[in-house]
């Protein structure tokens, strides 16, 4: 089910009504769990089974990891959890990619292999909920957390519908304790949650789908060598689209949860105002980057074993981060570029010290934003050839490139991209909440009304969020 | 900060703004209507009944959609047909789906628009692919999509501003697309909406089309642009005939009936279709090989009395008369 649909409005209204009925806390949680399964199952009912398996395996593994003292057996329980979750991921998400590469490799030695045609569906949000449940087992293994007190609480942690299919990827100690005691949104939480839900939908429907998606699709879907302006416009359009799409989803998720009285962590903090890539990853998809840091980079040794090892760890983490986003070499290369930028940044920081002020800060942020945009080319292009052609156009290698966007489309995208960058820059040390708290009620109400009106006028065809495919 | 009064202001202001927008849309001639999209088509597709010899299906492209009026049909025959024709789409995938995936054995009325009918059955062919996408959607739509369709279906008939998806519609994306081209790229051919559908997919051509010659010209230009690419290719006879003939045979074998029609055209379309798809080699030959009752508008003075305002579709008052006339002829022939 999509947040940007009438079906969701009705669904959520029913959930809210039940949530406020005078029934026991356990009943409310049961309803929330059932609602979460309905939310997921309305897309593809049989795939709820995967959620159940993941929940059951990690619940049992978590209990065993807590009770067991034999290190060998504890390790076995951890591996069971990892294998089941990674098994789902590999089978559903990477199976085709692995077979394709196997086919290519044996083709190199002159052997032919024609795999059976596969019609495996990629379960929505599988990368999110598998990582979430794995974090529980790994934390239990390292005895960082206490086990969830009840199966119901744990199942809700795995399945909580606002963040089930596209994050934020929540750690159990952030969510499970909130299910322990009866909770209900305060009036101010409820209103703020409703505002965030509107803001998130506005980002998705108006900013991403209406203002940017067509231009990105035109440029990345073109089979021509493009003019420099079109190439940059298409890239900036996608850069804005993916931010508004994904940050919009996270904002909706946080808002919806808050309307129920559940607090979810931030997932985006104005990433396009980042100065450098290490800051970018503290601002972009924070729940994934912190997951990769805590469960991959640090266990690999982090930066504790010398420069060479640090570089390898960084690269490995980012390559796998790229692969997490999609089963394709362009995603891996996107991860490689981010890893490379991080390594170079680390090297530069070791040699030069820059005292930041407003002027050099914005220039460095603009530099970072430009480099981020280059990585998006590989992320969005389905093939390396397309990406390289586009980069060639962006860097003036194709002076006679084709023009595929009209002037008003270019103005539209460049205006949105400029506003996006500047708003991130001016918001980088604050938050929407802090700004809203300082804004007079009638201005905030008017902004809210404009967003609601534009949402209604935009309508939208219920486009899926981009990150659902990851 | 957010407070109850913030929310009240937001909701009140939104109500006022949307009411104003609704009035503006209505003043521009938009009427509350349902959207003729893959969701509505799929909903109608569910209404095909197995083993019901009395059911009538209409398939084809836009000429079937515009020219057959369901109220008149029901009035004259006592049966309301199921409208599965789809604008700009080949009837091929729809017929294939009906034959291969249902036990339908009623009557199918299939209108032949040559450029959408005598084509290859391949996804690289736009007219085929677009129809195939709707058929595939019928099978792949999720429960969430069904629910959304039901809910939006409940709202759409009351709000004109919800008209969206076509050029010139009052949704935000379509409004942005109306900005005048600057000449940086080759401008697309204007192709604004000129019809709306009712809940049973009965099509109503916008009344403006009957009198507004500039509007007629806009659509005629679009047809001339789209149709100018058509080139005669008689290979299509061998490619398309066997496909349809086999499906028709299967329908007949299970007791079903197929009636073929060729609905009116004029101007550029009559000229282009006569040149690229000569009647003798295409329509007549196909009819002969299929052995189905067939009705070409040129063969009946009562069907040939209309002049489609934009060369390809009848305006609704004419379509009502046309439906009555063709049904009278069919009934007289005993095929209905």
Image (cartoon, coloured by chain):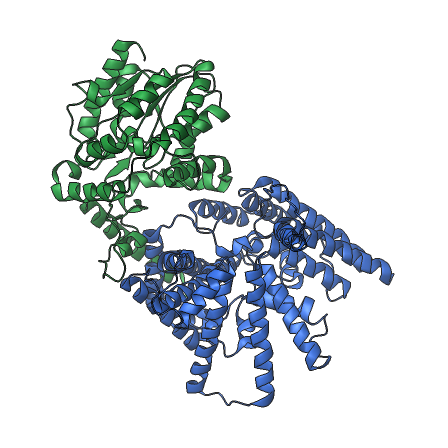
Chain colours: A blue, B green
Residue at image x 34%, y 64%?
A447
Image quarter of the C terminus of chain A: bottom right
- Pick whichever, A422 or A183, lies toward us: A422
Q: Position of residue B85 (x, y in %)?
A: 34, 30
- Residue A156 appears in the rendering: no
Q: Position of residue A390 (x, y in %)?
A: 43, 65
Residue at image x 44%, y 18%?
B249
Residue at image x 51%, y 61%?
A384
Report which quarter residue A145 is drawn in. Answer: bottom right
- Pick whichever, A120 or A294, lies toward us: A120
Q: In the rendered view, tell whether residue A244 sits above or below residue B197.
A: below
Q: Position of residue A75 (x, y in %)?
A: 81, 60
Report which quarter residue B269 is drawn in. Answer: top left
Q: How many marks?
A: 0
Q: Please state if B320 lies on the left or on the right of B41 as rendered.
A: left
Q: Position of residue B250 (x, y in %)?
A: 46, 19
Report which quarter residue B331 is drawn in. Answer: top left
Outermost right residue:
A70
Outermost front residue:
A110
Q: Please state if A132 lies on the left or on the right of A283 as rendered.
A: right
- Pick whichever, A399 or A248, lies toward us: A399
- Residue A11 appears in the rendering: yes
């Amino acid at each position: 089910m999509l947040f940007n649909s009438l079906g969701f409005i009705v669904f959520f209204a029913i959930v809210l009504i039940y949530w406020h009925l005078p029934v026991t806390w356990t009943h409310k949680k049961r309803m929330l769990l059932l609602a979460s399964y309905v939310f997921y199952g309305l897309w593809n009912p049989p795939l709820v089974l995967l959620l159940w398996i993941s929940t059951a395996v990690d619940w049992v593994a978590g209990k065993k990891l807590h009770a067991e003292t034999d290190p060998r057996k504890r390790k076995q329980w951890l591996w069971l959890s990892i294998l089941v979750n990674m098994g789902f991921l590999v089978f559903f998400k990477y199976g085709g990619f692995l077979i394709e590469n196997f086919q290519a490799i044996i083709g190199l030695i002159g052997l032919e292999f024609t795999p059976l045609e596969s019609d495996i569906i990629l379960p929505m949000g599988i990368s999110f909920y598998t990582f979430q449940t794995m974090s529980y087992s790994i934390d239990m293994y390292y005895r960082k957390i206490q086990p969830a007190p009840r199966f119901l609480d744990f199942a809700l942690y795995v399945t909580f519908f606002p963040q089930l299919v596209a994050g934020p990827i929540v750690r159990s100690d952030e969510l499970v304790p909130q299910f322990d005691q009866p909770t209900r949104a305060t009036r101010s939480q409820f209103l703020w949650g409703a505002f965030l839900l509107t803001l998130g939908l506005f980002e998705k429907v108006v900013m991403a789908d209406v203002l940017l998606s067509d231009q990105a699709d035109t440029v990345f879907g073109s089979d021509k060598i493009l003019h420099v302006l079109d190439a940059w416009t298409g890239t900036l359009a996608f850069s804005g689209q993916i931010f508004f799409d994904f940050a919009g989803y996270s904002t909706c998720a946080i808002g919806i949860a808050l309307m129920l009285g559940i607090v979810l962590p931030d997932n985006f903090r104005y990433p396009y105002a980042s100065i450098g890539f290490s800051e970018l990853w503290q601002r972009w998809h924070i729940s994934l980057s912190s997951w990769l840091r805590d469960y991959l980079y640090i266990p690999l040794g982090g930066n504790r074993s010398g420069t060479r090892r640090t570089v390898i760890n960084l690269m490995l983490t980012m390559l796998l981060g790229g692969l997490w986003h999609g089963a394709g070499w362009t995603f891996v290369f996107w991860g490689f570029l981010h890893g490379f930028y991080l390594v170079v940044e680390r090297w530069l920081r070791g040699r030069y010290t820059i005292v930041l002020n407003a002027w050099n800060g914005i220039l460095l942020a603009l530099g970072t934003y430009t480099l981020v945009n280059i990585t998006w080319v590989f992320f969005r292009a389905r093939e390396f050839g397309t990406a390289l052609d586009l980069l060639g156009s962006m860097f003036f290698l194709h002076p006679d490139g084709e023009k595929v966007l009209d002037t008003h489309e270019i103005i539209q995208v460049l205006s949105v991209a400029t506003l996006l960058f500047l708003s991130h820059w001016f918001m980088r040390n604050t938050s929407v909440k802090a700004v809203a708290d300082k804004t007079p009620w009638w201005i905030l109400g008017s902004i809210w009304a404009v967003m609601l009106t534009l949402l209604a006028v935009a309508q939208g065809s219920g486009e899926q969020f981009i990150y659902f495919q990851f | 900060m957010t407070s109850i009064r913030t929310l009240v202001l937001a909701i009140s202001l939104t109500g006022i703004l949307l009411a104003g927008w609704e009035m503006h849309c209505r003043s521009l001639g938009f009427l509350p209507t349902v959207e003729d999209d893959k969701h509505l088509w799929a909903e109608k597709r569910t209404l095909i009944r197995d083993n019901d010899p009395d059911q009538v299906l209409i398939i084809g492209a836009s000429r079937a959609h515009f020219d057959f009026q369901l109220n008149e049909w029901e009035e004259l025959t006592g049966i309301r047909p199921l409208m599965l024709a789809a604008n700009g789409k080949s009837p091929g995938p729809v017929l294939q789906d009906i034959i291969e995936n249902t036990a339908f054995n009623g009557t199918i009325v299939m209108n032949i628009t040559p450029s959408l009918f005598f084509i290859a059955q391949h996804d690289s062919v736009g007219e085929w692919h677009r129809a195939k996408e709707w058929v595939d959607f019928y099978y792949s739509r999720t429960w969430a999509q069904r629910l959304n369709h039901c809910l939006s279906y409940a709202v759409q008939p009351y709000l004109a501003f919800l008209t969206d998806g076509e050029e010139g519609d009052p949704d935000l994306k379509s409004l942005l697309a109306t900005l005048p081209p600057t000449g940086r790229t080759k401008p697309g051919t204007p192709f604004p909406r000129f019809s709306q559908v009712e809940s049973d997919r009965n099509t109503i051509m916008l009344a403006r089309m009957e009198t507004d010659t500039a509007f007629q010209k806009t659509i005629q230009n679009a047809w001339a642009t789209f149709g100018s690419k058509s080139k005669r290719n008689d290979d299509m006879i061998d490619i398309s005939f066997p496909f349809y003939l086999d499906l028709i045979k299967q329908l007949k074998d299970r007791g079903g009936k197929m009636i073929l029609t060729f609905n009116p055209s004029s101007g550029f379309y009559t000229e282009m279709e006569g040149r690229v798809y000569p009647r003798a080699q295409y329509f007549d030959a196909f009819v002969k090989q299929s052995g189905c009752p067939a009705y070409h508008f040129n063969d009946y003075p009562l069907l040939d009395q209309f002049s489609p305002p934009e060369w390809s579709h009848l305006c609704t008052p004419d379509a009502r008369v046309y439906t009555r006339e063709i049904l009278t002829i069919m009934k007289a022939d005993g095929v209905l």
